[in-house]
Amino acid sequence: MPTKKIEQIIKVPGKPDVIIRLARTQDMRRIQMLYVEIYGSSYSISIVTDKERMRSAIENDDYYWLVAESSGRIVGSLVYEVDLHHRISKAFGAVVSQEFRKLDLAYTMMKLILDDITHVKDFVDVVYATTRTANYAPQKLTESLGFVKLGIFPNTHKVQENETHCLTAYFTAQAMSKRRCRPRLIPEVAPFYEIVGRQLDLDKPLIKDVQGDYSDHKQKIPILPFEVITAPAFIKNRYKKFKNSGFFEHIVMPFHEPNLILITPDQSTEVYLTYNKKDKYSVVVGGVSAERSFTVVLESLARKVSEMDMAYIEVIIDSYSPWLQREAMDARFIPSAYFPCVKKAGKKRYDCIVFSRTFDVLDFRNVKIISLYKNFLKEYLKLWRENYIELVFKSEPR
C-alpha cells in the first residue's frame, strides 16, 4: 500500500484546535483511555484492549487508524481495515469524547478515509460497518455518508446485556458493475433482498423453494462429536495452509482471523471459527468436511459452541446456492441481513446472506433502530417464530 497521509485541522472558536491524523504507537495508552472513558471495562474488540494487537495495527499498512487530538489528549478514534486483494474494507471502533461530539468528528474522520480508499486511491469496491443500537447516532452517521442499510445482527454480543447491531455498507460504482446478478434465493430470504434491492435498484432474484433432508423436521439431526483446539499459534499457522472445500467454498467471513478449530476425532470435518469469550460471540470462518449435509455440520457446530457458553453463532453464505440456504435454515440458522458484492471471486463480486443462531432469549428492550432496520427485524422475528415456536404446533399429532 502506498504511504498513507491524512491530516485535517478543526478550528474551534475560543478553544485549542482539534487535529485529525493517523495514530502513532505513542498514542496507544491515550487511545485506550478514551475507550474506557466511553465504554468502561465492557469494550470487547481485542485490537483496542490488547496492546500488542493495537501496536501491530497502527504500524500495519492494512489499517488506517485515525485519532483526533486536542491539547495532547486523544478525543476521537476510528479504524478502517483494508483488504487490497479482495478490495473490501471494514470501518469500526468509532468513538468521540462526549464534550467534542458537537464538532462532527466521527463524520469527518469516516469521510476522510472513505474518500481516500474508494476514490482518491481506488483501493476498495466495498466498505462496511456494524453499528451499535444503544442510540440512533451511529446509524444516522453511516446513512449521512451514503451507506446502505443491509440488515441486523440480533443479540450478536452479550457483555453487560444483549446487544443487537446493524449492518451497513458503502458501494462504489465499480462494485455494482462487477456484481454477479440474478441471485438464487429460497423464499424466506426474499424479503431481506427486497429491502436492500429497493435501496440499490437490484435486479429480480430467482426464487427456488428447495427442500433438504431435514426440512420436514421429522428426522433427528445426527451430531458430529467435535473436539476443540484453541492453541493460537497452531491455528494461525494451520489456517495459512488451509483452503475451504465443499460447502465451505460458498461462505465468506471478511476480516476474521480464526482462533478456534472444531474437529472430529477422525479429522474428516475441520471447522475454523472466531470466537470471543467475553461477549460470547462466534462466527464460522471456513472449513472442510466429508459430511454431505450442511445441516448436520451447522447443527453440530451450534451444539458445541453452546456447550462452550457462546450465545451466538453466525455464517455468511453466498446468494447463488439455494440448497445451502435451505440446509442452514433446517439447522435453525435464521437470515437477518443481505450483503451485496461482499465476496470477490475472480473478476466478479458475489452477494451473500447472513444467517445466525442465538442461544439466549431474544431481548430487544434496549434496541433503538431507525425505520428501515425495523423492517429487517420484523422479517427476522417472523422467521424466528416460525422455526422456534410455530413449528412445535405444526408437529402436534391430531
Image: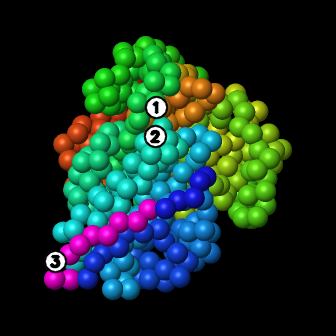
Going by the picture, which residue comes out furthest to the right?
A: 266
Q: Residue at x 32, y 39 (%)?
A: 148
Where does the magenta region start and end? Answer: 6-15
Residue 79 x %, y %: 46, 62
- List the residue tagged with mark 1: 175
Identify the element where label 1 is drawn.
helix
Q: Nearer the viewer, residue 242 or 180?
A: 180
Residue 235 x %, y %: 74, 57
Q: Residue at x 32, y 43 (%)?
A: 147
| Cβ atoms under marks 1 and 3 closer than 8 Å | no
Identify the element where label 2 is drawn.
strand
Alpha carbons under labels 1 and 3: distance apart: 41 Å
Q: Residues within 10 Å of mark 1 (few under 14, many from 20)?
A: many
Residue 49 x %, y %: 51, 75
Q: Name the mark nearer the viewer: 1 or 3.
A: 3
Going by the picture, which residue comes out furthest to the bottom?
A: 72
Q: Residues within 10 Å of mark 2 (few under 14, many from 20)?
A: many
- List the residue tagged with mark 3: 13
| Cβ atoms under marks 2 and 1 closer than 8 Å | yes
- List the residue tagged with mark 2: 126
Alpha carbons under labels 2 and 3: distance apart: 37 Å
| Cβ atoms under marks 2 and 3 closer than 8 Å | no
The amino acid on which the numbered mark 3 sits, given as a three-letter code, is Pro
Let me know if residue 237 is in the magenta part: no
